[in-house]
Image: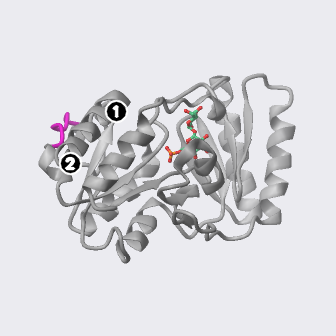
Amino acid sequence: MLIIKLPPPPISLLSDAALFLDFDGTLAPIADTPDGVVLGDDLLPLLNRLRSTLEGRLAIVSGRSIETLRELGFGDFLLAGTHGLEFARPGEAAEAPPRLAAIDAVEEAFHSFAEDKPGVLVERKSISVGLHFRGAPDWQQAAGDLADALAKEHGLSVQRGKMLFELRPGGADKGSAVTQLMREAPMKGGRPVFIGDDVTDEEGFAAAVDHGGTGILVGPPRHTLAAFSLEQVADVRHYLAEGAARSD
Ligand SMILES: O=P(O)(O)OC[C@H]1O[C@H](O[C@H]2O[C@H](CO)[C@@H](O)[C@H](O)[C@H]2O)[C@H](O)[C@@H](O)[C@@H]1O
């Protein structure tokens, strides 16, 4: 399969955009652990400026839970969390399905797996649970096998991420989140542009295309539905800053 380097996105793409932004690996560089992620002082002011430029058409669509996104400082933004399972508008309670007993059972099994494996990390999330092996890549295969077996046993979905297996209820993804958010203000009427780095963002790219928009891949070339790419988080921030400056 031929994989070509995609062109950088033109800045004009942002002028009528309904902008969907992934978080980890897109707005903030990947860190060794989930808690180690660093936003930097300029990110939230930048997103606020850009949202004004876009007349409100900006949302964060992340695998992180709404609770964590709010703790990270995104409480004032339109949010879709846990890969499209949760939604929140600024100042309002999150709409989220309940945490299933099966997720607690999986979390316990993940802890049993991780306890004698330094570097393997269990991430407790509001309605899902993650098993990270960034600190111990040799355990990837065994962690994946465990995740698959537990998903089958409990009727859950396995979400593959960057050095991460996450178990969660099915029925949603970042694509369904885009579709849902495009139905209503403030995103309705804009041209969807989804920026993301992970395989979990491909559904977001697909939905953006379905709604007449496009995707921007962050990172090295790969098989993707995105039409444009930016190499790294710093390039995303530069691109967004240029977009925000257009009406300054
Ligand atoms: O959809 P995203 O906003 O990209 O969130 C996806 C997952 O991101 C986090 O894990 C990833 O980032 C960590 C911090 O940089 C890194 O240590 C880890 O290896 C990555 O997989 C987060 O912890 C997960 O809950 C999100 O689902």
- Taking depth in this image into account, of 62 and 248 the one nearest to the observer is 248
Does the closest atom of ligand 1 sit within 8 Å of the Cβ of label 2? no
- Residue denoted by label 2: 227
Count the marks: 2
Q: Is residue 63 left or right of residue 199?
A: right
Which contiguous range is marked in magenta?
Answer: 3-9
Can residue 197 be seen by looking at this rendering?
Answer: no
Horizontal side of residue 235 vs 164, given as left or right: left
What main secondary structure does the magenta stretch of the protein show? loop
User: Which kind of residue does numbered mark 2 sit on?
Assistant: Ala
Q: Earlier in the sequence, mark 1 or mark 2?
A: 1
Residue 120 showing in the rendered view: yes
Q: Quadrant of residue 93?
A: bottom right
155 in relation to 11, above or below:
below
- Gap between marks 1 and 2, in whole Å? 13 Å
Image quadrant occupied by the N terminus: top left
At mark 2, the secondary structure is: loop
Mark 1 residue type = Gly
- Which x, y percent locates residue 15? 17, 55
Q: Which residue is mark 1?
A: 219
At label 1, counting other C-alpha atoms closer than 10 Å, the crowd grade (few under 14, some 14-19, many 20 or more) is: some
